[in-house]
Amino acid sequence: MNRKTAYAAAALTAVLSAPVLAYEEGSFILRGGMATVAPDTSSSTLFANGDAVPNTGVDVDNGSALGLTGVYMFRDHWGVELVAATPFTHEIQAEGLGDTFELGETKHLPPTLLVQWYPMDTQSTIQPYVGFGVNYTAFFDEEISSTADAKFEELLNATGDAKLSLDNSFGLAAEAGVDFAFGADQRWLFNVSVFWMDIDTDATVKVPGVGNVTAKVDIDPLVYMAGLGYRF
């Protein structure tokens, strides 16, 4: 064996014997996939200019978007994760006022920061984890439906198009997930995870000629995500 061949063999041996990238201090993990926000909605009755309207409320439909997470392992088994996403869009229904009808829609972004614990050996190719932290939800691009405008005109004698606004929310968050490593060097991951987020908001509809229709809404969704990840 000549010298070049010996060097090449030594280099190949070093690569093959190098430890698998693991859940150890100083490593990074990026994940991305489809995320679905499934609200567990409860709301107060609607209030028209401060007066309760019996047997009314609101509901919020599911919404899906691209979810993105980044993790820095600040100690073996322990990481800090930032959760981001492209905007989620949700349809909102009003219940009561004669029937259930489409009130409008909103978009939101839910940046979330969590501390994670990975209980398995740092070299494990199957790695469950849990996390706990805080969530901030920003609502924007709220729109009232034409159906709602017609309903307000019919029932409340509204004199123009209504406007919807939702207050931003700050609350707790928790998660559970699992990574499945694959590929020659085990850098790639298949990931599934579920998050719970405490999201509460005050909804206000400004109805021209009538005043404000308001409700307190607890959205408190489960967020389901599945996709791929990569360890650095």
Image (tube, grey):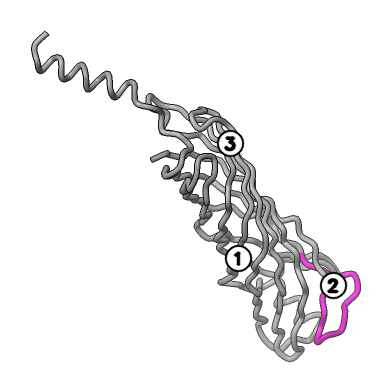
User: Residue at image x 56%, y 41%?
Assistant: 226
Front in this rendered view, residue 74 or 232: 74
Check if mark 3's residue and mark 1's residue have beta carbons within 8 Å. no
Q: Which residue lies furthest to the bottom in this view?
A: 209
Disc 1 target residue = 137
| Extent of the magenta region | 46-58
Which quarter of the rendering shows the C terminus? Answer: top left
Label annotation for residue 178? 3
Front in this rendered view, residue 61 or 193: 193
Q: Of the residues under marks 2 and 3, which one precedes in the sequence? A: 2
Q: In the structure shown, which secondary structural element does the residue marked by tag 3 occupy?
A: strand
Whether 146 is drawn above or below 209: the answer is: above
Residue 84: percent from left, percent from top: 51, 56
Residue type, numbered disc 3? Val
Residue 39: percent from left, percent from top: 71, 56
Front in this rendered view, residue 132 or 149: 132
The kind of secondary structure the magenta stretch mainly shows is strand
How far is mark 3 from mark 1, CA to CA? 25 Å
Disc 2 target residue = 45
